[in-house]
Image (cartoon, helix red, strand yellow):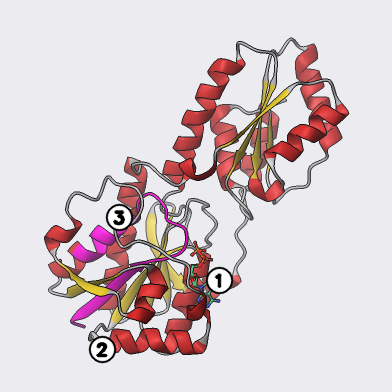
Amino acid sequence: MKRIGVLTSGGDSPGMNAAIRAVVRKGIYHDLEVYGIYNGYAGLISGNIKKLELGSVGDIIHRGGTMLHSARCLEFKTPEGQQKGIEQLKKFGIEGLVVIGGDGSFQGAKKLSEQGYPTIGVPGTIDNDIPGTDFTIGFDTALNTIIDAIDKIRDTATSHERTYIIEVMGRDAGDLALWAGLADGAETILIPEEDHKMDQVVQKLQRGHERGKKHSIIIVAEGCGSGVDVAKEIERLSDFETRVTVLGHIQRGGSPTAFDRVLASRLGAQAVELLLEGKAGRTVGIENNKLVDYDITEVLSRKHSIDKQMYKLSQELSI
Ligand code: ADP
């Protein structure tokens, strides 16, 4: 193998740049030429492809976002779109591809692999919702951004007697909400993987109030409905005054944490290692802090689940 490519796709996540850097540097270390594909699969189809030198990935390890930019590309979901992508790769003499992104991006990588094109998936998403790895690139940074925001809200919360509802990202996965709830001692965590009864949420608020609690914090993953709806329901069922904060896209941005930079460096480099070993159609990840890789079809057939023990613990600690 002489030439490999790298692209970022789907929602960006902090640490993607560190992963790109690792792919480029590890590739060049092994005498490969590394090409950057800009704007995800859209750039793959249109041939927005440029050679990346050692210096082109200098000074990016600490930056959020992705220097290769990202895009959503419907055309790539069609066999014709995928064929156009493979033709571009062949035109540039690129023999293997590293795709950094979430499960949608992995679907695209799977299709390329099925058509015989060597592709490795690197999990980059703040949601931490990809099987085959304990952590995805960007999760830790997003989590710390949430904690920072909640700490600030908590400061003002202590001055007023109110219920603070904080909506965090996570359409299908409650990891951000769960970890943030544990890390910040939230009274209630609402995640899509668990059923919730609002009257029980209100009863818990009431118990806290009777014990003299001045304020409460409820974290809602967006997959459970909006924070505004949760607030309305609480006010309908009780006399508690609520305030809602929707953290939104600030959760995606910012300088990656040390954890995400190290994770991204390890996973990006490992993807290159696999291509050099002649492996294809794999995803990389870490489990128990050891590098692992799995068949991409198998990974996509598995369903991400939250850590039930952690969820139970969050309930035990917030009685
Ligand atoms: P994420 O990777 O963050 O989950 P998306 O779900 O938006 O983000 O997927 C990113 C891109 O991956 C899509 O815009 C599309 O180009 C490609 N993609 C998603 N699903 C498929 C699929 N089933 N087949 C081929 N490509 C896909």
Label of residue 300 in the image: 1
Write down the residue under mark 3. 17
Q: Position of residue 274 (x, y in %)?
A: 31, 73
Crowd around label 1: few <14 · some 14–19 · many ≥20 (10 Å): some
Q: What residue type is labelled 2?
A: Lys
**What span is in magenta?**
1-24
Image height of 156 relative to 255, above or below: above
Asked whether disc 1 touches disc 3, contact meaning CB atoms under 8 Å apart, the reply is no
Between discs 1 and 3, the one toward the N terminus = 3
Residue 272 lies in quadrant: bottom left
Label of residue 34 in the image: none
| Element at label 2 | helix
Write down the residue under mark 2. 91
Residue drawn at x 29%, y 46% as measured from the top left: 63
Quarter of the picture containing the C terminus is top right
| Element at label 3 | helix
Q: Which amino acid does label 1 sit on?
A: Leu
Residue drawn at x 42%, y 49% as measured from the top left: 138
